[in-house]
Image (cartoon, rainbow, N blue to C red):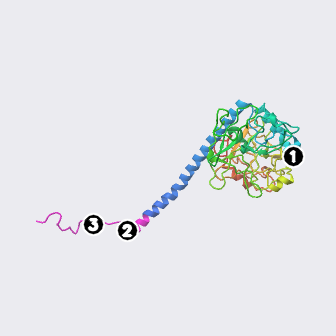
Amino acid sequence: MNSPSTRARSPLAPRRRGFTLVELLVVIVIIAILIALLLPAINGAVRTAKVAAASAEINQIAQALAQFKAQYGVDPPSRIVLSETGNYSPAYLGNTLAPLGPRSVSYLRRIWPKMTLSTTGPLSASQIPGGWYDFNGDNKAPTIANGLLTSGQIHVLDGAECLVFFLGGLPGIVDGAYTTTGFSKNPSNPAINSNITPLGANRSSPTFEFRPGRLNDNYPVFANGTTGNGFPEYSDNLSASGTPQPFVYFSSYEGAGYDPDDVNYAEEGALKDGTVVNATWAATGQPSSGIGSIFFNEVNGSFAPNPYTNGAPIVSTGNTVNPEYINKNSFQIISAGIDGQFGPGGGYKANATDPLVFNAAAAMPVNLAPSMRQREQDNVTNFKGGRLD
Protein backbone atom coordinates (compact mmCIF):
# COMPACT_ATOMS: atom_id res chain seq x y z
CA MET A 1 0.00 0.00 0.00
CA ASN A 2 1.39 3.37 -1.02
CA SER A 3 1.96 6.08 1.59
CA PRO A 4 0.21 9.45 1.24
CA SER A 5 3.51 11.03 0.27
CA THR A 6 4.02 8.66 -2.66
CA ARG A 7 0.42 8.22 -3.72
CA ALA A 8 -0.19 9.48 -7.27
CA ARG A 9 -2.34 12.58 -7.52
CA SER A 10 -5.80 12.08 -8.90
CA PRO A 11 -6.33 13.64 -12.32
CA LEU A 12 -9.32 15.46 -10.80
CA ALA A 13 -7.35 17.12 -7.95
CA PRO A 14 -7.18 20.99 -8.25
CA ARG A 15 -3.82 22.43 -9.26
CA ARG A 16 -2.33 25.67 -7.83
CA ARG A 17 -1.65 28.38 -10.37
CA GLY A 18 -0.71 32.13 -10.36
CA PHE A 19 -2.51 35.13 -11.87
CA THR A 20 -2.46 35.38 -15.59
CA LEU A 21 -1.07 38.52 -17.23
CA VAL A 22 -4.59 39.60 -18.19
CA GLU A 23 -5.82 39.25 -14.60
CA LEU A 24 -2.86 41.30 -13.30
CA LEU A 25 -3.55 44.03 -15.82
CA VAL A 26 -7.22 44.12 -14.79
CA VAL A 27 -6.25 44.46 -11.12
CA ILE A 28 -3.79 47.24 -11.93
CA VAL A 29 -6.41 49.11 -13.96
CA ILE A 30 -8.96 48.79 -11.14
CA ILE A 31 -6.42 50.10 -8.59
CA ALA A 32 -5.52 53.01 -10.89
CA ILE A 33 -9.20 53.91 -11.28
CA LEU A 34 -9.72 53.80 -7.52
CA ILE A 35 -6.68 56.04 -6.97
CA ALA A 36 -7.91 58.49 -9.62
CA LEU A 37 -11.29 58.62 -7.88
CA LEU A 38 -9.80 59.00 -4.41
CA LEU A 39 -7.06 61.57 -5.16
CA PRO A 40 -9.39 64.56 -5.69
CA ALA A 41 -11.19 63.73 -2.46
CA ILE A 42 -7.87 63.38 -0.60
CA ASN A 43 -6.49 66.59 -2.10
CA GLY A 44 -9.73 68.36 -1.31
CA ALA A 45 -9.58 67.18 2.28
CA VAL A 46 -5.96 68.34 2.57
CA ARG A 47 -6.85 71.76 1.13
CA THR A 48 -9.83 72.06 3.45
CA ALA A 49 -7.62 71.21 6.43
CA LYS A 50 -5.03 73.78 5.38
CA VAL A 51 -7.66 76.48 4.93
CA ALA A 52 -9.13 75.65 8.34
CA ALA A 53 -5.66 75.88 9.88
CA ALA A 54 -5.01 79.22 8.17
CA SER A 55 -8.37 80.56 9.37
CA ALA A 56 -7.62 79.42 12.91
CA GLU A 57 -4.22 81.09 12.78
CA ILE A 58 -5.77 84.32 11.53
CA ASN A 59 -8.10 84.21 14.53
CA GLN A 60 -5.09 83.74 16.81
CA ILE A 61 -3.36 86.74 15.20
CA ALA A 62 -6.55 88.77 15.65
CA GLN A 63 -6.54 87.85 19.33
CA ALA A 64 -2.90 88.94 19.56
CA LEU A 65 -3.84 92.27 17.97
CA ALA A 66 -6.57 92.66 20.60
CA GLN A 67 -3.98 91.93 23.29
CA PHE A 68 -1.64 94.51 21.75
CA LYS A 69 -4.42 97.10 21.78
CA ALA A 70 -5.26 96.29 25.40
CA GLN A 71 -1.60 96.86 26.34
CA TYR A 72 -0.82 99.92 24.22
CA GLY A 73 -4.25 101.42 23.65
CA VAL A 74 -4.17 101.29 19.87
CA ASP A 75 -4.06 98.82 16.97
CA PRO A 76 -0.68 98.76 15.23
CA PRO A 77 -0.41 100.89 12.09
CA SER A 78 -0.15 98.97 8.84
CA ARG A 79 2.56 101.16 7.28
CA ILE A 80 5.21 103.09 9.11
CA VAL A 81 8.60 104.72 8.63
CA LEU A 82 11.22 103.98 11.29
CA SER A 83 14.11 106.42 11.62
CA GLU A 84 17.06 105.05 13.57
CA THR A 85 18.14 108.62 14.42
CA GLY A 86 14.71 109.61 15.74
CA ASN A 87 14.62 112.41 13.16
CA TYR A 88 11.28 112.60 11.35
CA SER A 89 11.61 116.09 9.91
CA PRO A 90 10.42 116.49 6.29
CA ALA A 91 13.92 117.58 5.23
CA TYR A 92 15.38 114.36 6.64
CA LEU A 93 12.75 111.95 5.31
CA GLY A 94 12.60 113.52 1.85
CA ASN A 95 9.64 114.28 -0.38
CA THR A 96 8.57 110.66 -0.81
CA LEU A 97 8.46 109.67 2.86
CA ALA A 98 7.64 113.03 4.45
CA PRO A 99 3.85 112.46 4.21
CA LEU A 100 4.26 109.24 6.20
CA GLY A 101 6.26 110.97 8.95
CA PRO A 102 3.46 112.54 11.04
CA ARG A 103 1.41 109.34 11.13
CA SER A 104 4.49 107.33 12.11
CA VAL A 105 5.44 109.74 14.89
CA SER A 106 1.87 109.81 16.17
CA TYR A 107 1.71 106.01 16.55
CA LEU A 108 5.21 105.62 17.96
CA ARG A 109 4.43 108.22 20.63
CA ARG A 110 1.18 106.52 21.52
CA ILE A 111 2.79 103.08 21.79
CA TRP A 112 6.03 104.24 23.46
CA PRO A 113 5.30 107.70 24.94
CA LYS A 114 8.82 108.14 26.34
CA MET A 115 10.62 107.75 23.00
CA THR A 116 12.54 110.85 21.93
CA LEU A 117 11.41 111.80 18.43
CA SER A 118 11.92 115.00 16.48
CA THR A 119 9.89 116.45 13.63
CA THR A 120 12.16 119.48 13.20
CA GLY A 121 15.74 118.26 12.95
CA PRO A 122 18.54 116.03 14.27
CA LEU A 123 18.74 114.80 17.85
CA SER A 124 21.73 114.42 20.12
CA ALA A 125 22.90 110.83 20.56
CA SER A 126 22.76 111.43 24.32
CA GLN A 127 18.98 111.89 24.11
CA ILE A 128 18.42 108.25 23.14
CA PRO A 129 19.36 105.38 25.49
CA GLY A 130 21.86 103.25 23.62
CA GLY A 131 22.64 106.11 21.25
CA TRP A 132 20.13 105.29 18.50
CA TYR A 133 17.15 103.13 17.63
CA ASP A 134 18.54 99.87 16.24
CA PHE A 135 15.25 98.75 14.71
CA ASN A 136 16.75 96.13 12.39
CA GLY A 137 19.30 94.82 14.87
CA ASP A 138 22.35 95.25 12.63
CA ASN A 139 24.29 97.12 15.36
CA LYS A 140 25.35 99.81 12.86
CA ALA A 141 25.27 103.20 14.53
CA PRO A 142 24.21 106.30 12.55
CA THR A 143 26.65 109.06 11.63
CA ILE A 144 27.28 111.55 14.45
CA ALA A 145 28.57 115.07 13.82
CA ASN A 146 29.12 117.52 16.66
CA GLY A 147 27.18 115.24 18.94
CA LEU A 148 24.13 115.17 16.63
CA LEU A 149 22.72 112.16 14.78
CA THR A 150 23.09 113.52 11.26
CA SER A 151 22.33 110.45 9.13
CA GLY A 152 21.27 106.84 9.53
CA GLN A 153 19.02 104.12 8.25
CA ILE A 154 15.37 104.79 7.46
CA HIS A 155 13.07 101.77 7.19
CA VAL A 156 9.62 101.62 5.60
CA LEU A 157 7.44 98.72 6.77
CA ASP A 158 4.31 97.64 4.90
CA GLY A 159 1.28 95.93 6.38
CA ALA A 160 2.72 92.41 6.32
CA GLU A 161 5.95 93.60 7.97
CA CYS A 162 4.11 95.74 10.53
CA LEU A 163 2.15 92.68 11.62
CA VAL A 164 5.38 90.82 12.47
CA PHE A 165 7.18 93.87 13.85
CA PHE A 166 4.54 95.04 16.32
CA LEU A 167 3.34 91.60 17.44
CA GLY A 168 6.70 89.85 17.41
CA GLY A 169 9.22 92.57 18.12
CA LEU A 170 12.48 93.36 16.43
CA PRO A 171 13.91 90.90 13.90
CA GLY A 172 16.76 88.55 14.70
CA ILE A 173 18.45 85.64 12.96
CA VAL A 174 19.13 82.31 14.69
CA ASP A 175 20.77 79.43 12.77
CA GLY A 176 20.22 81.28 9.51
CA ALA A 177 16.47 81.76 10.03
CA TYR A 178 14.52 84.87 10.97
CA THR A 179 13.01 85.05 14.43
CA THR A 180 11.36 87.74 16.52
CA THR A 181 13.00 89.02 19.69
CA GLY A 182 10.37 91.13 21.43
CA PHE A 183 11.11 94.70 22.51
CA SER A 184 13.38 96.22 25.10
CA LYS A 185 11.67 96.98 28.39
CA ASN A 186 13.43 100.35 28.43
CA PRO A 187 10.42 102.67 27.92
CA SER A 188 12.59 105.23 26.12
CA ASN A 189 14.03 102.85 23.53
CA PRO A 190 12.17 99.67 22.54
CA ALA A 191 15.02 98.83 20.14
CA ILE A 192 17.95 98.97 22.56
CA ASN A 193 20.12 95.83 22.34
CA SER A 194 17.87 94.54 19.58
CA ASN A 195 20.64 92.28 18.28
CA ILE A 196 20.79 90.25 21.50
CA THR A 197 19.06 86.85 21.52
CA PRO A 198 17.60 84.85 23.17
CA LEU A 199 15.18 86.96 25.15
CA GLY A 200 16.40 88.05 28.55
CA ALA A 201 15.03 89.79 31.59
CA ASN A 202 15.34 93.17 29.86
CA ARG A 203 13.21 92.17 26.88
CA SER A 204 9.49 91.58 26.55
CA SER A 205 8.13 88.41 24.99
CA PRO A 206 6.39 88.63 21.59
CA THR A 207 2.63 89.13 21.67
CA PHE A 208 2.34 86.41 19.03
CA GLU A 209 4.74 83.51 18.60
CA PHE A 210 5.64 83.51 14.91
CA ARG A 211 7.14 80.25 13.67
CA PRO A 212 10.71 80.98 12.52
CA GLY A 213 10.49 78.67 9.49
CA ARG A 214 7.66 80.76 8.09
CA LEU A 215 9.25 84.16 8.52
CA ASN A 216 10.50 85.28 5.09
CA ASP A 217 11.88 88.57 3.79
CA ASN A 218 10.51 88.41 0.24
CA TYR A 219 9.32 92.02 -0.06
CA PRO A 220 9.94 94.58 -1.38
CA VAL A 221 11.13 93.31 -4.76
CA PHE A 222 13.67 95.66 -6.32
CA ALA A 223 14.28 96.31 -10.00
CA ASN A 224 17.67 94.57 -9.85
CA GLY A 225 16.02 91.35 -8.65
CA THR A 226 17.02 91.58 -4.99
CA THR A 227 14.37 91.22 -2.32
CA GLY A 228 13.84 92.17 1.29
CA ASN A 229 14.62 95.02 3.64
CA GLY A 230 15.60 93.16 6.80
CA PHE A 231 12.06 93.01 8.19
CA PRO A 232 10.34 89.65 7.59
CA GLU A 233 6.75 88.82 6.70
CA TYR A 234 4.87 85.78 8.02
CA SER A 235 3.95 83.17 5.41
CA ASP A 236 0.43 81.77 5.47
CA ASN A 237 1.77 78.30 4.59
CA LEU A 238 -0.99 77.82 2.02
CA SER A 239 0.58 78.54 -1.36
CA ALA A 240 0.89 75.30 -3.33
CA SER A 241 3.77 76.58 -5.44
CA GLY A 242 6.05 79.55 -5.92
CA THR A 243 6.98 82.18 -3.36
CA PRO A 244 5.15 81.76 -0.02
CA GLN A 245 2.72 84.63 0.40
CA PRO A 246 2.42 86.43 3.73
CA PHE A 247 -0.58 87.31 5.82
CA VAL A 248 -1.17 90.97 4.96
CA TYR A 249 -2.59 93.42 7.47
CA PHE A 250 -4.55 96.61 6.95
CA SER A 251 -5.38 98.95 9.82
CA SER A 252 -8.42 101.21 9.72
CA TYR A 253 -6.50 103.69 11.87
CA GLU A 254 -9.31 103.59 14.44
CA GLY A 255 -11.98 104.29 11.89
CA ALA A 256 -10.13 107.11 10.14
CA GLY A 257 -10.07 104.97 6.99
CA TYR A 258 -8.00 102.28 5.34
CA ASP A 259 -5.03 103.19 3.16
CA PRO A 260 -4.85 100.79 0.18
CA ASP A 261 -1.20 101.75 -0.32
CA ASP A 262 -0.28 100.11 3.00
CA VAL A 263 0.44 96.90 1.05
CA ASN A 264 1.51 97.23 -2.60
CA TYR A 265 2.65 94.05 -4.34
CA ALA A 266 1.66 95.11 -7.88
CA GLU A 267 0.45 91.57 -8.51
CA GLU A 268 -1.75 92.62 -11.41
CA GLY A 269 0.73 95.03 -12.99
CA ALA A 270 1.10 98.77 -12.68
CA LEU A 271 -2.16 100.57 -11.99
CA LYS A 272 -2.56 104.32 -11.64
CA ASP A 273 -3.01 105.34 -8.01
CA GLY A 274 -1.81 108.92 -8.12
CA THR A 275 1.33 108.18 -6.12
CA VAL A 276 4.43 110.27 -6.78
CA VAL A 277 7.73 108.42 -6.55
CA ASN A 278 10.97 110.36 -6.64
CA ALA A 279 13.56 109.52 -9.29
CA THR A 280 16.03 107.84 -6.91
CA TRP A 281 13.51 105.40 -5.49
CA ALA A 282 11.97 104.74 -8.87
CA ALA A 283 15.40 103.79 -10.24
CA THR A 284 15.93 101.22 -7.47
CA GLY A 285 12.48 99.74 -7.81
CA GLN A 286 11.41 100.76 -4.31
CA PRO A 287 7.61 100.48 -3.92
CA SER A 288 5.64 103.70 -3.86
CA SER A 289 5.03 105.32 -0.50
CA GLY A 290 2.18 107.70 -1.27
CA ILE A 291 -0.35 108.31 1.47
CA GLY A 292 -4.11 108.10 1.23
CA SER A 293 -4.60 107.07 -2.37
CA ILE A 294 -8.21 106.85 -3.55
CA PHE A 295 -9.62 103.33 -3.26
CA PHE A 296 -9.71 101.76 -6.69
CA ASN A 297 -12.64 102.09 -9.07
CA GLU A 298 -12.96 102.19 -12.85
CA VAL A 299 -10.93 105.41 -12.96
CA ASN A 300 -8.33 105.02 -10.21
CA GLY A 301 -6.44 101.94 -9.14
CA SER A 302 -4.22 100.67 -6.36
CA PHE A 303 -1.81 97.74 -6.53
CA ALA A 304 -3.00 94.37 -5.18
CA PRO A 305 -3.96 93.46 -2.54
CA ASN A 306 -6.55 95.94 -1.34
CA PRO A 307 -8.77 96.01 1.74
CA TYR A 308 -12.35 94.89 1.23
CA THR A 309 -15.52 96.96 1.17
CA ASN A 310 -19.11 95.79 1.65
CA GLY A 311 -19.95 96.33 -2.02
CA ALA A 312 -18.72 97.59 -5.35
CA PRO A 313 -18.22 101.28 -6.18
CA ILE A 314 -21.38 102.95 -7.45
CA VAL A 315 -21.21 105.30 -10.43
CA SER A 316 -23.85 108.02 -10.61
CA THR A 317 -23.86 111.13 -12.83
CA GLY A 318 -20.14 110.87 -13.40
CA ASN A 319 -19.22 110.52 -9.72
CA THR A 320 -17.99 107.37 -8.01
CA VAL A 321 -19.22 106.64 -4.48
CA ASN A 322 -17.35 103.96 -2.59
CA PRO A 323 -19.16 101.81 0.01
CA GLU A 324 -17.88 101.35 3.55
CA TYR A 325 -14.88 99.22 4.37
CA ILE A 326 -15.49 95.93 6.14
CA ASN A 327 -14.36 96.15 9.79
CA LYS A 328 -14.32 99.91 9.32
CA ASN A 329 -13.16 100.54 12.91
CA SER A 330 -10.56 97.80 13.32
CA PHE A 331 -8.44 95.87 10.79
CA GLN A 332 -8.38 93.30 8.02
CA ILE A 333 -6.04 90.29 7.76
CA ILE A 334 -5.86 88.63 4.33
CA SER A 335 -4.28 85.39 3.10
CA ALA A 336 -3.74 84.82 -0.64
CA GLY A 337 -4.99 81.23 -0.35
CA ILE A 338 -3.86 78.06 -2.10
CA ASP A 339 -3.20 79.75 -5.45
CA GLY A 340 -0.84 82.31 -3.86
CA GLN A 341 -2.59 85.24 -5.57
CA PHE A 342 -4.34 87.98 -3.63
CA GLY A 343 -6.30 89.40 -6.56
CA PRO A 344 -7.11 93.10 -6.75
CA GLY A 345 -9.48 93.16 -3.78
CA GLY A 346 -12.46 95.47 -3.41
CA GLY A 347 -16.18 94.88 -3.11
CA TYR A 348 -17.26 91.79 -1.20
CA LYS A 349 -20.90 90.95 -0.55
CA ALA A 350 -21.23 88.16 2.00
CA ASN A 351 -23.90 85.54 1.30
CA ALA A 352 -24.52 86.93 -2.20
CA THR A 353 -24.73 84.76 -5.32
CA ASP A 354 -21.64 86.54 -6.67
CA PRO A 355 -19.88 87.69 -3.46
CA LEU A 356 -16.77 88.99 -5.23
CA VAL A 357 -18.71 90.84 -7.95
CA PHE A 358 -16.88 88.96 -10.70
CA ASN A 359 -18.84 90.39 -13.59
CA ALA A 360 -19.44 93.96 -12.47
CA ALA A 361 -17.35 96.30 -14.62
CA ALA A 362 -17.86 99.08 -12.08
CA ALA A 363 -16.05 96.97 -9.50
CA MET A 364 -12.83 96.83 -11.49
CA PRO A 365 -10.08 99.37 -12.07
CA VAL A 366 -8.97 100.41 -15.53
CA ASN A 367 -7.23 97.73 -17.68
CA LEU A 368 -8.08 94.92 -15.27
CA ALA A 369 -10.29 92.07 -16.45
CA PRO A 370 -13.19 91.06 -14.17
CA SER A 371 -11.87 87.49 -14.26
CA MET A 372 -8.93 88.66 -12.14
CA ARG A 373 -11.26 88.75 -9.14
CA GLN A 374 -11.64 84.99 -9.37
CA ARG A 375 -8.16 84.77 -7.86
CA GLU A 376 -9.72 85.89 -4.59
CA GLN A 377 -12.11 82.95 -4.27
CA ASP A 378 -9.71 81.03 -2.04
CA ASN A 379 -8.51 84.04 -0.04
CA VAL A 380 -8.92 83.65 3.73
CA THR A 381 -9.66 86.65 5.96
CA ASN A 382 -10.47 87.56 9.54
CA PHE A 383 -13.98 88.71 8.59
CA LYS A 384 -15.05 85.54 6.75
CA GLY A 385 -14.38 82.11 8.20
CA GLY A 386 -12.77 79.94 5.52
CA ARG A 387 -12.57 80.90 1.86
CA LEU A 388 -14.19 84.06 0.56
CA ASP A 389 -16.35 82.09 -1.85
Residue at the image point whose x is 70% and y is 32% from the top: 185
Q: In front: mark 1 or mark 3? A: 1
Local SS, label 2 = loop
> Along the line of sight, which residue is nearer the eye, 80 or 61?
80
Residue at the image point whose x is 43% and y is 65% from the top: 26
Q: Say which label, 1 or 2, has the lower sequence index.
A: 2
**Do we see residue 169 in this rendering?**
yes
- Up-down relation of residue 76 to residue 377 (above or below): above
Local SS, label 3 = loop
For badge 2, the amino acid type reads: Thr
Q: Which quarter of the rendered picture does the N terminus lie within? A: bottom left
Q: In front: mark 1 or mark 2? A: 1
84 is within the stretch colored magenta: no
> Along the line of sight, which residue is nearer the eye, 91 or 165?
91
For badge 1, the amino acid type reads: Gly
3 is within the stretch colored magenta: yes
- Up-down relation of residue 69 to residue 78 (above or below): above
Where in the figure is residue 9, as x and y percent of width and height? 20, 67
Q: Which residue is mark 3?
A: 15
Q: Say which label, 2 or 3, has the lower sequence index.
A: 3
**In the image, which residues are magenta?**
1-26
Real-space CA distance between mark 1 and mark 2, rounded to the nearest whole angstrom: 81 Å
Q: Say which label, 1 or 3, has the lower sequence index.
A: 3
For badge 3, the amino acid type reads: Arg
Q: Which residue is mark 2?
A: 20
In the orientation shown, which residue stands out farthest toward the left? Answer: 1
Where in the figure is residue 54, as x and y percent of width and height? 62, 44
User: Which secondary structure is most common in the magenta stretch?
Assistant: loop
Q: Which residue is mark 1?
A: 94
Horizontal side of residue 43 vs 373, given as left or right: left
